Amino acid sequence: MLLVLGRRLANIIPTMLAVVALVFLLFSVLPGSFISGMNEDGRSTIDPAVMERMRKEMGLDDPLIERFAKYVAATATGDLGISFRTREPVTKMLAGRIWPSLKLVLAAMTFAILVGVTLGFLAALKPGSLIDTAAMVGAISGLSLSQFWFGLMLMYLFALKLQWLPSFGYGDGGLRNLILPAIALGVGPMALLARTTRAAVLDVLNADFVRTARSKGMSERRVVEWHVLRNALVLVITIVGLQFGSLMGQAVVVEKLFAWPGVGSLMVDSVFQRDMPTVQGCILMIVLFFLVINTLVDLAYVVIDPRIRYR
Amino acid sequence: MRKLAWLAVAAIAVIGAGAANAQQTPRKGGTLRMTAPYAASFGSLDPHVTPRAQDDIVGKALQRSLYNWDTAANKLSLELAKSVSVSADGLTYTYKLRDDAFFHNGRKMTADDVISSFTRIMDGSKGYPGARYVRLIKGAVDVEKGTAKEISGLKKIDDFTLEMTITDRVDPGYYFFGGSTAILPKEEFEKGNYASNPVGLGPFKFKEHIPGSRVSMERFDKFYKTGQPYLDKLEVLIMAEAAARDVAFRNKEIDTSILGPAQYVAYRADPQLSKGILEVAEMFTRSMHMNLGSIKPFQDKRVRQAINYAINADLIISRLAKDKAYRATSWLPSSAASFDKTMKPYPYDPEKAKKLLAEAGFPNGFEFEWTTSQNESWGLPIVEAVIPMLARVGIKAKPKLVEVTVLTEILMKGDHQALISSSLTGPDSLATLRCYYSKTPRTACNYTGFNNAEFDKLLDAAAQEGDLAKRDEILKKANNLLYEEAPVWFFNYNKAVLAFQPWVHGLQPNPTEITHQYPENIWVDASSPAK
């Protein structure tokens, strides 16, 4: 197990290096600069002399290779640079955003797993039934829904009409403010999990070892609990892992809509302002999160299915 | 009987008037929940670091500058000084500073704070945005270059008297009323973490900042305006998404909300919501800049005028902008003191446009590339509406779509034939019109490459004129000349619309930026649901 963990962690380093290079080069060739972003749609004016000073201060006039080398060297020591916009260390800015993002992603995933896996499981146990049809219609709808539109509908229903929950914001960081953005973010993975769970459970239900277990006279409940659930879980965990890992990146729209102070909304703002150090920091954070979650999923396979061994 | 009836009427009138007065008497206490709509976060709470309108929403509560914008009088007024006297040559200003202004850390403001704040802004290694304004003071450039440590044009006479010598005969108020020249306590910004714990002279003191969510502030009891602020708490909530803002406003979770064209229509149509709408012609002019050196037709005044005649701007404002804009008459906005109120915008007259084109030697029109962003109020939707109007007079416009962040860079480089954008055009009319002064480089703001000797002469005369009323008259002539020369297609002035809840009072229609409210004037009545 430790060997697997070691190998997986070692793989993270070249992946991160590639991401650093890609993001840096991409933003270096992108038209526009931080300084023109300060214009704020014509709401502010920019002084050329101040521009010059800022370019110098931020090292924007240095050759690309030199800037890249400096960036990689600094990143290796955990220094993600200074934000062009706030003049604060990017690590400090990210530190303030990680917990709200994690909270949102965890809540969305909890919702997705609880509802999606349960629906998929029930649908597979009674294929063709009303519950199966309803669950699959719900799943397909969930997959096709735009997060923005669905989020607005949630706001309209639960905040404006029913007055049960606040429509936006972080509030005191409690559950009330978390519910609506979490559902809006979690509805896509929920739908995917429902479909995947249904397919996985149906597959296992038709497997030889399940037939054998039944023919041995094992009760249906025991068959499901001991054989079906455990075997179907491998596929479900793969999807959970992939979705979980990518959810922080997907949260951009929901965070902006609900004014949720996560990494996603920081990244979008920074892209529009061409605040490169912050964008790079956000992307690195999201990629790192994805890689760590995938490593954990790999390890979970070994625990769930002892037949799986990594060489 | 008749007497009794009159008495009853009189009594009702008195009671009614009393009720109205009671309604207008500011109530102490309560919380105001304003919104910051221009981005999903604040840039910085250190006002010297940021030039952004979004950040100045909070800045108006936490900080104060030497001057402010008096919305009621529609002019600048002294804020941190009680009086000012000007030397005969118009270059030396002696300020009698307030002796009752305290920072939130309890220390009284003195002339040293003005000097240290302006010296900080001129730190050449930092590139603070406010340097463009402080550079007006004699010797400030030396500090910026690192050849001096002190700004020679700033002299402390005593703790509350400051002498400022400037290099141009301009009104320094225009330079020192924004947040980027706010007066800060040296001992606080020298700590190095000012943005995390901003300490200012404003009516509210900092309580909490949740990045990407909100800034919370509470009343500063030692604020220098007696009895103000009225509110106990002020929250500025970040809400960049218009649709979400709409739901939150209708749900009474926020007290103010900037409206876009779509919401403006809906709110005006709603009998309740329509009662809480504040409108103002902001000092932003939306226009199509013609790069006069790019193609031959743009060099001819008649062609530029023809473009202005060929476009039915009123129709576009009414149909596309949903009346959330005022027709632009000239470069200066209608709220500017130098605006000529007798001026009329170019009428829609395609026949005259054709005639002018023919006179200029382009009877069959010509073709040009029109750079635009996606902006709904002054971007691609507008360009698409204009293209058929121009085609009608023979001009073929080819749109070139770019991201909004790139627009300024293109304008500065002159990589455009024509470009539509929104420009800040106030409140300093002289600085605004300098964008068409021949010696103003393109990188500064002469985006059309305009060069007109008569215009330059007028601007030189205005700069030399010490009498502000006479200066306005000269600038009026310069603005009228610009209208005649038409280096841009004058499209519209932004109509800023702020929706507010019925319990909110004291909002100001600030034409420099409607979201920039001086919150000490705002109060909420007892019906406010905010705790």
Image (cartoon, helix red, strand yellow):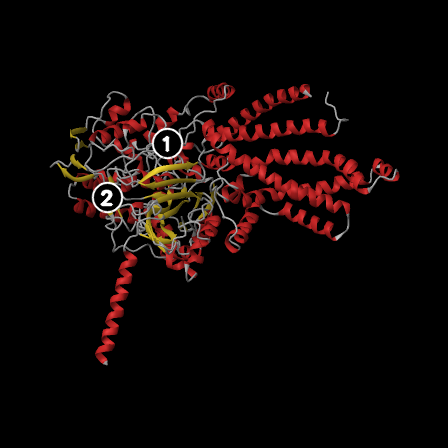
* Residue B510 percent coordinates (x, y): 31, 48
Tell me the chain of label 2: B
Relative depth, front residue between A150 and A272: A150
Callout 2: SS = loop
> How crowded is the residue under tag 1: few (<14 C-alpha within 10 Å), some, or many (20+)?
many
- Output the chain of dot 1: B
Name the residue that disc number 2 marks. B225
Q: For this rendering, which residue is in front, B210 or B163? A: B210
Q: Disc 1 designates what residue?
A: B195
Q: Secondary structure at mark 1?
A: helix
Tell me residue B36's x, y (percent): 40, 43
Q: Is residue A131 left or right of residue A76?
A: right
Q: Is residue B428 left or right of residue A35?
A: left
Mark toward the viewer: 2 or 1: 2
- Residue furthest to the left in view is B88
Q: Residues within 10 Å of mark 2 (few under 14, many from 20)?
A: few
The residue sitting at 71% across, 27% down in the picture is: A303
Between B258 and B467, the one nearer to me in the picture? B258
Compared with A268, A159 (above or below) is: below
Q: Which mark is residue A253?
A: none
Image check: A275 left or right of A296? left
Vertical position of residue A98 compared to residue A121: above or below: above
Residue furthest bottom in the image: B1
A82, A163: nearer the viewer? A163
The answer to whether residue B291 shows anywhere in this view is no
Q: CA distance from mark 2 to mark 1?
A: 25 Å
Indicate the amino acid at tag 2. Lys
Q: Residue at x 52, y 19 (%)?
A: A76
Residue B110 can be seen in this image: yes
Q: Picture coordinates of residue A252 (x, y %)?
A: 53, 39
